Amino acid sequence: MIEPLPTPASLKAQARRLKTQLEASGETISHSHSLELLAIHHGYRDWNTLNAIITRKAPAPVAVGDKVDGRYLSHAISATIVSVQPLQLGRYRIQLKLDEAVDVAASRRFSAWRKQIIAVIDGTGVTAETTSDGKPHLQLDLSP
């Protein structure tokens, strides 16, 4: 699961706590070194790389309240964006409220109706997760 990135302020507060804890155990490090350690902990090469990613202002491909069309598990959908949360690596966790519920069960023996969807999309409105035939779970039509 891709986790939301912390804010710069929360990372700096974590770095201060890390520095304090290390000093309490007898190891002295600088604040900048504690920032570097946190960047590595979050999977980035260094603080400058992490800071550049968390402070960039790339807009999300959708906004709360937007009406969107697309496909979810091969079903045509129309929906309203309920929430958008930026994540790592140019991905966004979105919540959709479908205009009409869809039955996503492949079996005729039971139903699995969906009225809301939570998914992680990229900047083009497509999920990385795919069905067994290689189609994205969710694909939004973001053309103007």
Image: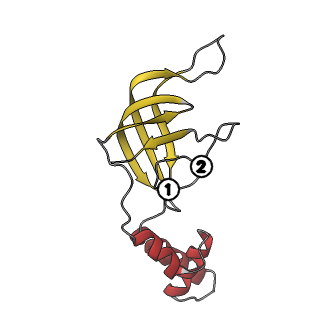
Q: Residue furthest top?
A: 109
Q: Residues within 10 Å of mark 2 (few under 14, many from 20)?
A: some
Say if mark 2 contacts mark 1, CB within 8 Å: yes
The residue pinned by badge 2 equals 128
Crowdedness of circle 1 by 10 Å Cα count: few (<14), some, many (20+)? many
Kind of residue at disc 1:
Arg
* Residue type, mark 2 in image: Ala
- Residue 31: x percent and y percent? 49, 85
Residue 21 location in percent, x, y? 57, 76
**Among the 4 quarters of the image, the one containing residue 52:** bottom left
* 28 w.r.t. 15: above or below: below
Q: Which residue is drawn at 36% across and 49% down?
A: 62
Q: Which of marks 2 and 1 is nearer the N terminus?
A: 1
Furthest-left residue in this view: 65
Q: Which residue is drawn at 57% across and 88% down?
A: 29
At 49% from the left and 61% from the top, the residue drawn is: 90
Q: Which residue is drawn at 47% across and 29% down?
A: 76
In three-dimensional space, the C-alpha distance between marks 2 and 1, rounded to whole angstroms, equals 10 Å
Q: Is residue 111 above or below residue 36?
A: above
Left or right of residue 66: residue 22: right
Number of marks in picture: 2
* Label drawn at residue 91: 1
**Viewer-nearest of discs 2 and 1:** 2
Q: In this view, does 119 lie above or below 25?
A: above
Callout 1 secondary element: loop
